[in-house]
Image (tube, rainbow, N blue to C red):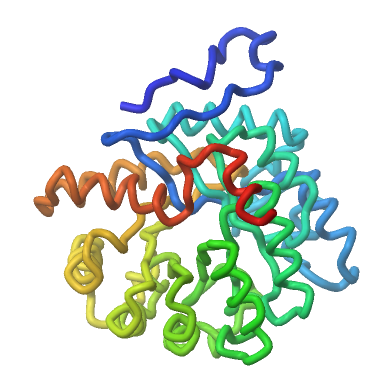
Amino acid sequence: MTSPRDVGPVSDARASEQPLADAVPTAPGDVVDAHVHLFTVGLLEEWLGSLPPDSMQRFRIALKERRFGRRGDQVLPDMDPVQTARFYVERLRAADVAKAVVVSVAPDNQWTRDFLVAARGHVHALCNLDPRDPGAPDLLAREMAVGFRGAKLLPVNRCFRLSDPACRPFFEAAAELKAAITVHYGVSVDPGADLRYADPIDLSPVARDHPDVTFVIAHFGAGWLDSVLRVAYQCPNVCVDSSGTNNWLDHHVPKMTLAEVFERCLTALGPERVLFGTDSNTTAPYRTWIRRMQQRTLEEMGLSPHDLDLVMRRNAVRIFRLDEPLQAAKEDVR
């Protein structure tokens, strides 16, 4: 069970206004969520204010209406970064989750940096950027210096290919900075997503040529599981995470169960390359049901306690360096 050892009391209103204590290292039996999201009014205001007014309409509508979700039935929270950090830690604690990794969608976002500082190692983050941008290597270095643990790339949403030669300087910088990369391939709820960029096969030459960079393909490839397994066979630095409802299975041929997906990945990649995640965000309750269902599925499959700990905690801690002191990531880029 995750201990409330370093979160502090949540019932005292005065205590809730105090800064969080630094997170302590995780231990076997703890759970780490390797894929969560962060959406608030302040974060979106800063991000969208820097973009052309006709861009990112899905998020602009959410900000205007203060509602989120595919049906607009979720409230977009309006809290400052410090308040949001404590809110996030408390909801993780309630779900028996020790730490989590936010996969950012907003590039170069000061609100997210302030949140990350306030979270004190309980919640980490991956920055967001366009790897084709000539300034991407420098931006990654700056983000790693303030505590980000890597980057989240959205080729299917932002319509680019990681194999584009323009991305090579970014991946070279990622190797030098020890930055892990989570990538969203496959289907997406984003109405602007383009499935021409959805196939993880595109990652093959990138992972091959940058063996020191760890790539995590989100959501088991979200409908492209066969490509994930092929790329991972070729490239031992390719991993997967289990995040989300995995409702892509409803459209998968042949029919598969979540247990069968786990079995394929555990067999092909080994338990050292599968990470647990929920794809939870701040506009809805934490997805405790996914956290319980996935752990129960693995237990019912007969996974050993050692391998279960790899999937549910230790792989994320190792790949994203979650138990290192907060200062360690800064020193690496000096």
Residue 160 higher or lower than 72, as above or below:
below
Residue at 73%, 72% (x, y): give it. Answer: 136
> Residue 79 at what x, y percent from top left?
75, 33
The residue closer to the viewer here, 177 or 304, is 177
Relative placement, left or right, of 222 versus 256 is right
Residue 255 higher or lower than 108, as above or below:
below
Residue 231 higher or lower than 315, as above or below:
below
Residue at 48%, 44% (x, y): give it. Answer: 322
Residue at 55%, 40% (x, y): give it. Answer: 123
> Residue 133 at what x, y percent from top left?
75, 79
Residue at 36%, 27% (x, y): give it. Answer: 2
The residue closer to the viewer here, 291 or 129, is 129
Q: Quadrant of the N terminus?
A: top left
| Residue 71 in sight in this render | no
Count of all numbered marks drawn on residues in the image = 0
Relative placement, left or right, of 316 versus 279 is left
> Residue 42 at what x, y percent from top left?
80, 44
In which quadrant of the rendered view does residue 9 lie? top right
Residue 129 higher or lower than 232, as above or below:
above
In which quadrant of the rendered view does residue 15 lie? top right
| Residue 60 in sight in this render | yes
> Residue 145 at what x, y percent from top left?
69, 52
In which quadrant of the rendered view does residue 162 lie? bottom right
Q: Quadrant of the C terminus?
A: bottom right
Q: Residue furthest left?
A: 302
